[in-house]
Image (spheres, rainbow, N blue to C red):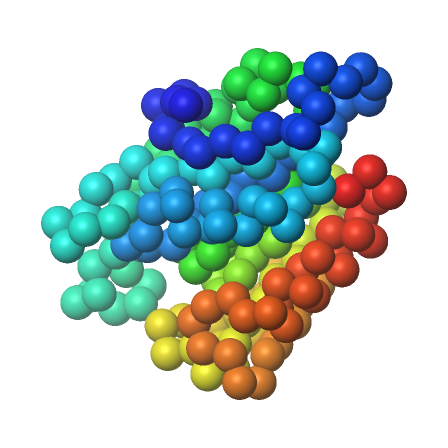
Amino acid sequence: MELNGLLAKFRGPSDPHSAGNPLPSFVLLHGYGSNEDDLFSFERFFPAQSAVFSMRAPLALAQGGRAWFSIDFEKPRSEWSNHEEAEQAIDQLLGALEALPAAAGHALLPPILVGFSQGAILSLATVLQAPSKIRGVAAFSGYWNRDLTPVIPSAERVPPLWASHGEEDQVIPIAWPDTTYDELQKQSGILVDYHRFKWLGHGIDADAFNAFRQWLNSLSETI
């Protein structure tokens, strides 16, 4: 399916015709160089009565795969990310979120964004720009990019934020989330429920995913 110009894989609720309250929804955002198939492999772990959307990033890379925004690894770290493309991706994603209930054919709760690497960076930037439209964020192997948050909302407006990172990550050093999540809390009082995993590299292992599922279960009885 296509949502505001973004292609997505979809897994609907097991009983799409059931009446009642709005259902939980989840939007999965893959990392740089990957595609929508990557995180969609987790769809079976989400509640049967929920809607799961795994989005394809808008930019095609010459080496294959997709990206939410370009990265120039030859530049200093502060100039790596193409901020204009990132802002366009955030706007496009927010438009796609508006289309989720119609696509699912069911009333939905605001989505929980589940992002990996660049998808995690995008998820955190999106929720801090539009906190009322999102129910929560889980950020695997990412960090908070201050440049993508022009205005930081008040802490009471921000939904729950969860993150994990491997201490052996060679792509995004663990010092980045360590530092930026601490800065976010000090600057605005926004707390990230942050988990470090000693032997983990740039990825999601069983321990990280189990910690994520425990966080989901703690959010609400409807998850």
Relative to 23, say whether 89 is above or below: below
* Quarter of the image where one finds residue 185: bottom right
- Which residue appears at 28% of the width and 54% of the height? 33
Q: How many marks are shown on the rendered structure? A: 0
Of residues 186 and 89, the one nearer the viewer is 89
Picture coordinates of residue 162, whole percent (x, y): 66, 58
Q: Which residue, as the protein is rendered here, is positioned at the far front?
A: 14
Q: Is residue 24 left or right of residue 170?
A: right
- Which residue appears at 57% of the width and 14% of the height? 102
Relative to 152, say whether 173 is above or below: below
- Which residue appears at 76% of the width and 60% of the height? 214
Q: Is residue 67 left or right of residue 120?
A: left
Q: Which residue, as the protein is rendered here, is positioned at the far right?
A: 221
* Quarter of the image where one finds residue 60: top left
Relative to 10, say whether 120 is above or below: below
Picture coordinates of residue 170, whole percent (x, y): 37, 78
Q: Is residue 90 visible to us here?
A: no
Picture coordinates of residue 101, whole percent (x, y): 61, 19
Relative to 153, say whether 130 is above or below: above
Q: Is residue 204 left or right of residue 55?
A: right
Task: Please identify the quadrant where the N terminus is shown.
Answer: top left
Picture coordinates of residue 37, whole percent (x, y): 39, 45
Of residues 194 and 78, the one nearer the viewer is 194
Q: Is residue 18 visible to us here?
A: yes
- Which residue appears at 55% of the width and 33% of the height? 11
Task: Please identify the quadrant where the C terminus is shown.
Answer: top right
